[in-house]
Image (tube, rainbow, N blue to C red):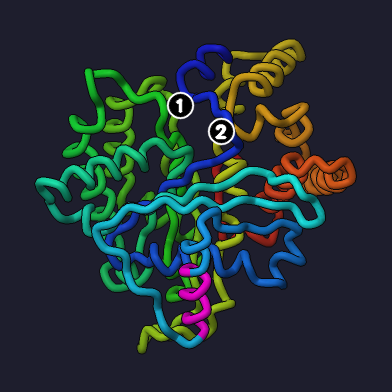
Amino acid sequence: MIQDLTRKIFRPRRVIEQHIAVFGESGSGKTTLLSTFYGWHQEPFFRRTAGYSLLADDTSQGQRLSNEYLKMKESLLPPPTRYQHQAFRFNITVRGLDKSAGSIVWHDYPGEWWTETKADVEGQNKIEAFRTLLKSDIAFFLCDAQILKEEGGKYLKRLFGSFRGEIERQKSAIITDNEPLQIFPRVWVICLSKADLIPEKDVYWFRDEVHRSAIDELRELREVFKMMLSGDEYQSIGEDFLLLSSAKFDSETGKIVNPEQNIGIDLIPPISIILPVQRALIWAKVGETGQAAVYRLTETFRLLTTNWLKYMPLVGNVFMLMDDTAKSITEKLKELESSARKKGDSVTAVVAAFRGKIEDEQNRKVYFSNKQ
């Protein structure tokens, strides 16, 4: 079972990196989200308290994102990106350690391509962008809180239905030689962007609203994915929900009130790294019991699997705490992070810190996972 899982859904990698795909219609806040994501991780307060930081691999990209974030402090929104797919690589460094802990690569899908048919060169660019995003490790699917507030559940039904239609239109171009996809975002986190516009609602309300309004569309989307995937049983969509807000906006004027009052931004890196690994461990443990199975699982993941695990001495140090109480896990993770820092092990330090962030009870109203 374990060997079969790794053969079907993992790819070997020479470097430590995690690719994330961000899907959302035009105007859903993807551009502002990216600028805030980078700018907030550059804030001295964040770097000091979080213990890690992100740095754009491309200097010009980093400067542009930083400038857009600074302009947000003057209530100026960044210009929208149109008809252009671009990847942003962010290196992760641990405070006080020289060695990089790896990188996150952010892929953004232009919203206009979702709703408009393109031909010739631009049509080919659209297909190539879609292929690239579907090679990511995890996907964040944005639902616009502003439209949800105005239209209610029928917006969610339309949103997931239209995305399913786009996947079906692109399927023949994405799958070549009738070979199912092995590399694919196996985990899809459903996000409520511009969540500050509905301050009285929490992530549980959002989860219930999606399930109530679009559960049939989600099921159909899973079926479409199954027809495209190798190891089609290894996928998770509609199980994880996240509230996101790039800043606090005035709901009437649309202007930024407070660019430093964001929601869920600091959870994106931990979710991106930890969630795919946790899901894979759950999938691999199906049908495996006993201490010998745990040992085989640990060794298989350490040697064969994802970018992060293959660089860790023992997977169990961080990811085998799944049955402990939340308080016990948090304490053990802090000890692991502290020990890793002293040893100069930046990878383990970051992964332990990320796992601890997800387990933090303060995030319960912002992030929900039915596997926690």
Q: Quadrant of the N terminus?
A: top right
Q: Number of callouts in the render?
A: 2
Q: Is residue 160 left or right of residue 57?
A: left
Are the residues tagged 2 and 1 within 8 Å (C-beta)?
Answer: yes
Q: Is residue 338 left or right of residue 140?
A: right
- Residue 328 visible somewhere in the drawing: no
Q: Determine whether 200 is above or below 51 in the image.
A: below
Residue 130, x across and y down, in percent: 29, 42
- Front-most of residues 57 and 236: 57
Q: Is residue 66 magenta?
A: yes
Residue 99, x across and y down, in percent: 74, 45
Q: As shown in the figure, which amino acid type bears the numbered disc 2?
A: Arg
Residue positioned 80% across, 40% down in the render: 345
- Which residue is labeled 1 in the image? 234
| Crowding at mark 1 (Cα within 10 Å: few <14, some 14-19, many 20+) | some
Residue positioned 77% across, 45% down in the render: 349
Q: As shown in the figure, which amino acid type bears the numbered disc 1?
A: Tyr
- Residue 193 visible somewhere in the drawing: yes
Residue 17, numbered label = none
Residue 279, numbered label = 2
Q: Main secondary structure of the magenta part?
A: helix
Residue positioned 79% across, 48% down in the render: 330
Residue 31, x across and y down, in percent: 39, 65
Residue 248, x across and y down, in percent: 50, 79
Q: Quadrant of the C terminus?
A: top right
Q: Determine whether 243 is above or below 177 in the image.
A: below
The residues colored magenta run 64-73
Q: Secondary structure at mark 1?
A: loop
- Front-most of residues 60 and 180: 60
